[in-house]
Amino acid sequence: MKQYSMKFVLNCLMSASLLLASVSAHAWGYQGHRIAADVASGLLTQQARIRAGELLMGGSLADVASYMDDERRNLKRQIPGSDKWHYDNIPVCGNASVAAVCHGGDCASARIDYFSEILADRTTDKATRVFALKALVHLIGDIHQPLHAADDGDHGGNDVSIGSRNLHSEWDSGLVKKLVRYQSADDYALTLLDRYHTQIQNAQSGNATAWAMESHDLAQRVAYGNLPGFACGQGPMSVARLPASYYDQALPVVELQLVRAGARMAMVLNHALAK
């Protein structure tokens, strides 16, 4: 895996514009990332909560959940390949593996492992650990969006038109908005913690590679599998609108993946911040 000096990265970011326009490949969007982070916050141990608060100077996980998207263009300019940290681009058709598509460690699953080690090392300087924490909060959310673990020559559904939108953006934000409706992201996270409280412990298992393959399976069966007219290898396509049956299958998947993302985020942080 390529190694980078986090001090170098942070200096580059501070010298650049703080925020730039977001790009279409963001997973979950601001709302979904905040929900996953809020779920995680509700599952932190007291020790992890204190440590995270110290690193974030009193801020919350939700406050930094979209940091890696906000700074994505700056990072890409300073670290070629860092834009690939947000996904594991596994072909939706066939038997491809994470190892086959994660080159040089530039994929979400590898970066989750990498930043977990950095965060857990208390001999590492604070600024670097803060960056690692922000990265983990975001990338663990990313890898649970099914279209960040699958591709059919269409940039993870970005080139699949759904009316005026695209399939990727529908999974990023459209489906999340349908679930949340009039609740705030914070309130919806509390709803999920209550609704899934008996399933949280079972969700807190596996590793980043396993989570990527789980998301890939959901993309195969639901995100692409239920898409009208989909055929392996056809690449960009257009669908006038998604049928009600598609939403019936997709909405429960999105809800469950947000819960899993938060539960596993807490698992990673509880371990890394235990010392």
Image (cartoon, rainbow, N blue to C red):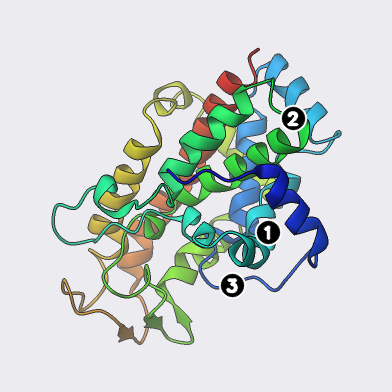
Question: Identity of the amino acid at label 3?
Answer: Val
233 relative to 192, above or below: below
Which quadrant of the view contains residue 149? bottom left
The kind of secondary structure element at disc 3 is loop
The residue beneath circle 2 is 125
Q: Residues within 10 Å of mark 3 (few under 14, many from 20)?
A: few
Q: Position of residue 136 (x, y in %)?
A: 58, 40
The residue beneath circle 3 is 23
CA distance for labels 2 and 1: 41 Å
Q: Is residue 223 left or right of residue 255?
A: left
The kind of secondary structure element at disc 2 is loop
Q: Position of residue 66 (x, y in %)?
A: 66, 54
Of residue 85 and residue 205, the one placed in the foreground of this image is: 85
Which residue shows up at 68% across the image and 59% down it?
A: 182
- Frontmost of labels 2 and 1 is 2
Disc 2 vs disc 3: Cβ atoms closer than 8 Å? Answer: no
Q: Is residue 12 left or right of residue 275?
A: right
Q: Position of residue 76 (x, y in %)?
A: 59, 64
The residue beneath circle 1 is 182
Question: Identity of the amino acid at label 2?
Answer: Asp
The answer to whether residue 195 is visible is no
Question: Identity of the amino acid at label 1?
Answer: Tyr
Screen quadrant of the N terminus: top left
Which residue shows up at 72% across the image and 16% down it?
A: 46
Screen quadrant of the C terminus: top right
